[in-house]
Image (cartoon, rainbow, N blue to C red):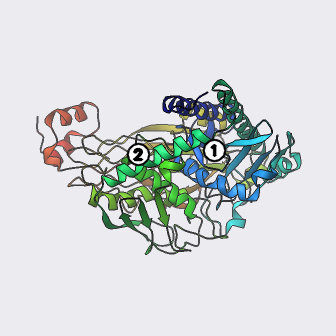
Amino acid sequence: MIATKTNLQVMWDRLLGVVEEQAQALIRAAFSPIVRECGDISAGIFDAQGNMLAQAVTGTPGHINTMAEAVKTLLDCFPVQDAKAGEIYMTNDPWIASGHLNDFLLLQPAFLNGEVIGYSACTSHLFDLGGKGMGPDGSDIYDEGLFIPPCRLVERGEVNHLLLDIIKANSREPVANLGDIYALIACCETGTAQLLKMMDEFRLDHLLELSKHIIETSATATRESIRDLPQGRYDYRLDVDGYENVIELHASLKITREAIQVDFTGTSGCSRYGINVPLNYAAAYTVFAMRCLIGPDIPNNAGSLGLFKVRAPENCILNAQHPAPVAMRHTLGQMTPDLVYGCLHQAIPDRVPAEGASCMYDLPLRHTPESLLMGGKAFGIELTHNGGTGARPGLDGLSATAFPSGVWGSQVEISESVAPIVIKRRELICDSGGAGEFQGGLGQHIEITPAGNDAILVFLSVERMKFPAMGRSGGHHGNAGKITMCDGRAIPGKGEFRVNPGETMIVQTPGGGGFGDPAARSGKRIASDLQNNIISREFAQAIYNYHQ
């Protein structure tokens, strides 16, 4: 087919359909609820040089944007000239893949007429890989589970069963892990097959012209969006709860006519615990935050991502080096959008939302060691819950919605069907969003208790319990997060905790900050909030001076 501009655009649109089908293959085949119910994945198609051409909309920035760079690293390990049909490469190296050991990255070369014309790649979360597991208390990466360097998972079409046996032998959830790995393989194979099918439809024997069109068009459009911004340097600091100490996150954002650079110099050093963040993960969420405001209608690919650069001093907490513990890297990694938005608000104050809950309230649960000795059943599950997002210029925040992760909240029925827990109550928290002309989204109240006669272990690593989401442009802050037991005992936001039979753990996720002066909120909106239990009558009277 002649590569006209129109034809190339049609091919590009077709490629976006390919990656979405690829992602759905992974979700449908996965065993773990966090993948099949919550969408904790990424899927993408790359050219022969490792440039990302398309990524599925389904997925998280922490998987998608890390994958965009990880593929190039894997190609250094497995050069294109050595590739063979029927191979799939794999690693869970946090500094290559997605920031901690639980994320597996797979890459498959696509062959046409004996030549590699591109790659299919995907990432998803496996719940348990041994060690201390999904919790922040490891002292180094070796505490946190099985580390797999870049290797061939599939060779000449045959799965490496020894490798699978090693993974199963090092997991408390061996069957789920095995099923999730085969789902990842199916995702790669679906992407490769659909890519080749698309090329056959358009009678293509390479992706060179299409790749050039996608990358150049996206880069040009992104550069134009950057040139609309006021040039300069903007600095911001965000204090966050941390573990052993409060942590300072610093960012300096520099806008030029050609690119944007973010530097985390000044940020606190690494923690002793597993809340440290490899730079690939911190950069993924930082760039995602900027892309949400700068050229948001431009698809994510090597062209649109390439104009954003992120730097950090080695061994600050946003650029942890091997072998630092990083199991809960999302705790602070997902705070970087609020950090960079503090900078961008100085440049484009009419476009930047207020701060939100940001860090998802991730609740890894599993059996206690003694329950197995008494004949109990092993289990492990990772619940994902979210607070409110910050209000936006012209719009209220979203309640119980994951931003920036995009992970869907765990469903009550699914959670109870795969783990011995009962979720006694789950509802939005009235008055938890920050007041403003536009109000912050609400947090949620969740009550969890063991279903049987055995205790359960909870591995906490959450934020916004000391420092709530701040409002912007006169908006008020949202409610802080809170975790307690039914007897009123306060539970710290990080560390291993035990819930005994008959006890109930109560989790309250944070609300988002408000945007704009509360005095400017319309009476119509306030009346609607009252009708829908978003705010109480006392809140309306005290904050909005509304007495109708």
Along the line of sight, which residue is nearer the eye, 76 or 176?
Answer: 76
Q: Position of residue 494 (x, y in %)?
A: 53, 61
Along the line of sight, which residue is nearer the eye, 488 or 159?
Answer: 159
Q: Is residue 175 left or right of residue 438?
A: right
Assess disc 1: are there few (<14), some (14-19) or many (≥20) residues with their C-alpha within 10 Å of its C-alpha: many
Spatial distance from mark 1 to mark 2, Cα to Cα?
Answer: 20 Å
- Residue drawn at 49 percent across, 46 percent down: 216
Residue 465 vs 273, above or below: the answer is above
Residue 36 vs 507, above or below: the answer is above
Q: In this rendering, does residue 298 appear at all? A: yes
Residue 245 vs 170, above or below: the answer is below
- Residue drawn at 47 percent across, 37 percent down: 425
Question: How many numbered marks, from 0 up?
Answer: 2
Report the quarter where the C terminus lies.
top left
Q: In this rendering, does residue 356 appear at all? A: no
Between marks 1 and 2 in the image, the one whose residue lies nearer the viewer: 2
Q: Is residue 166 left or right of residue 284?
A: right
Where, by quadrant of the figure, is residue 18 drawn? top right
**Element at badge 1?**
strand
Q: Is residue 276 left or right of residue 143?
A: left
**Element at badge 2?**
helix
Q: Position of residue 313 (x, y in %)?
A: 51, 74
Report the quarter where the N terminus lies.
top right
Residue at the spot of label 2: 221
Residue at the spot of label 1: 46
Along the line of sight, which residue is nearer the eye, 526 or 118?
Answer: 118
Assess disc 2: are there few (<14), some (14-19) or many (≥20) residues with their C-alpha within 10 Å of its C-alpha: some
Q: Position of residue 29 (x, y in %)?
A: 69, 32
Which amino acid, mark 2? Answer: Ala
Which amino acid, mark 1? Answer: Phe
Q: Position of residue 192 (x, y in %)?
A: 70, 35
